[in-house]
Image (spheres, coloured by chain):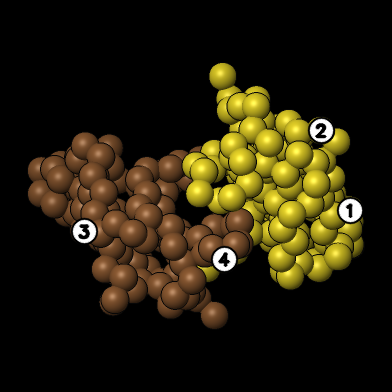
Amino acid sequence: DQQVKQNSPSLSVQEGRISILNCDYTNSMFDYFLWYKKYPAEGPTFLISISSIKDKNEDGRFTVFLNKSAKHLSLHIVPSQPGDSAVYFCAAIDTGRRALTFGSGTRLQVQP
Amino acid sequence: DTAVSQTPKYLVTQMGNDKSIKCEQNLGHDTMYWYKQDSKKFLKIMFSYNNKELIINETVPNRFSPKSPDKAHLNLHINSLELGDSAVYFCASSEGGQGYNEQFFGPGTRLTVL
């Protein structure tokens, strides 16, 4: 049972444009959400997070939006850069449980 | 300086063998994790240790046995390897065991069972 879903396995955007990566979840106990970025042959690295009490968190070019009623979050990257090309994982954690539940990832390709 | 390191990076072995993967972190964190990334690319938690104490043990065959000799190390031993064990295994660490804290991942160990 996939509790965190990233339905787009890949996304291609032009340099300078906005990249929007989407994530849906089913477990209403999730109360904290994170995005990780992964380059080939490396481990995931933390990018940005958001608590369920917020609907937006911004860090430089990266903004995460959370819509709790829709159980949906998205990561916006503006402007996109070729160095952003990587696999992006959405992850969530629920109250009381101390492990991350990951989605299957979206491969972002930013074209120069 | 490597924050979370794993050895070996690649491991190719025959079915039925026993193998170990080692993980070390130099971040001073007190919680360490093992994740498995399967062929569908999902990263799934296997184990978590906080201060050498097992705090998460997901539904993993008992052929997998984690061992934490100290806070900085969490090794994964696998007995009687099976074809389905082929995957990339990631070690991670964090400050505190609540999961909200940023987890730092190692580069992964690609295990191939023939």
Residue A45: % across, % down: 45, 41
Front label number (4 vs 3): 3
Q: Secondary structure at mark 4?
A: loop
How many neighbours does mark 4 have within 10 angstroms: few (below 14), some (14-19), or many (20 or more)?
few
How many neighbours does mark 2 have within 10 angstroms: few (below 14), some (14-19), or many (20 or more)?
few
Residue A6: % across, % down: 37, 68
For badge 1, the amino acid type reads Asp
Q: Are discs 4 and 1 both within one chain?
A: yes
Q: Secondary structure at mark 1?
A: loop
Which one of the lettered chains is coloured brown? A
Q: Are discs 4 and 3 both within one chain?
A: no
Q: Residue at x 44, y 62 (%)?
A: A31
Q: Colour of chain B?
A: yellow
Q: Residue at x 15, y 45 (%)?
A: A78
Name the residue tied to disc 1.
B18
Q: Closest to the observer: B62 or B114? A: B62
Left or right: B88 in relation to B101: right
Q: Closest to the observer: A67 or A102? A: A67
Front label number (4 vs 2): 2
Name the residue tied to disc 2.
B70
User: Which residue of the protein is positioned furthest toward the bottom in this rendering?
Assistant: A1
Distance from disc 4 to disc 2, alpha carbons, whole Å, reads 31 Å
Name the residue tied to disc 4.
B39
